[in-house]
Image (cartoon, helix red, strand yellow):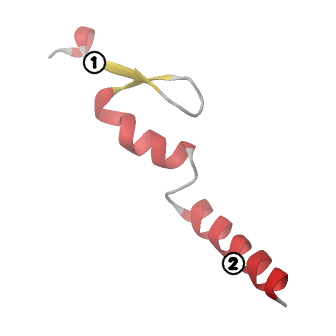
């Protein structure tokens, strides 16, 4: 493949067209599964779940 004809996919979350080689990293970020923000979300969910169990 060259730059002009790389396969691309539509993100199932944000509907942007993403190059196939960047789709997995994009999807992780788009769904909040990767990086610093994901750990913040996980911590927040854990706190909420703990409070509901009390």
Q: To which quarter of the image does residue 38 belong? A: bottom right
Residue that appears at 47% across and 49% down: 28
Q: To which quarter of the image does residue 19 belong? A: top left
Secondary-structure class at tag 2: helix
Q: Quadrant of the N terminus?
A: top left
Secondary-structure class at tag 1: loop
In screen coordinates, is 2 left or right of 14?
left
Q: Nearer the viewer, residue 36 or 8?
A: 8
Residue lying farthest to the top in this orientation: 4
Residue 52, position in %: x, y? 83, 80
Total tally of numbered discs in the picture: 2
In screen coordinates, is 51 left or right of 21?
right
Q: CA distance from mark 2 to mark 1?
A: 39 Å
Give residue 7's mark. 1
Q: Quadrant of the C terminus?
A: bottom right
Residue that appears at 66% across and 69% down: 40
Residue 6, position in %: x, y? 25, 17
Q: Are marks 2 and 1 in contact (CB under 8 Å)?
A: no
Residue that appears at 17% across and 14% down: 2
Dot 2 or dot 1, earlier in sequence:
1
Residue lying farthest to the bottom in this orientation: 54
Vertical arrangement, residue 40 with respect to residue 27, above or below: below
Give residue 46's mark. 2
């Amino acid at each position: 493949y060259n730059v002009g004809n790389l396969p691309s996919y539509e993100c199932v979350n944000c509907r942007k067209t993403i190059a196939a080689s960047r789709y997995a990293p994009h999807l992780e970020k788009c769904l909040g599964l990767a990086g610093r923000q994901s750990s913040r979300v996980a911590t927040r969910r854990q706190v909420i779940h703990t409070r509901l169990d009390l």
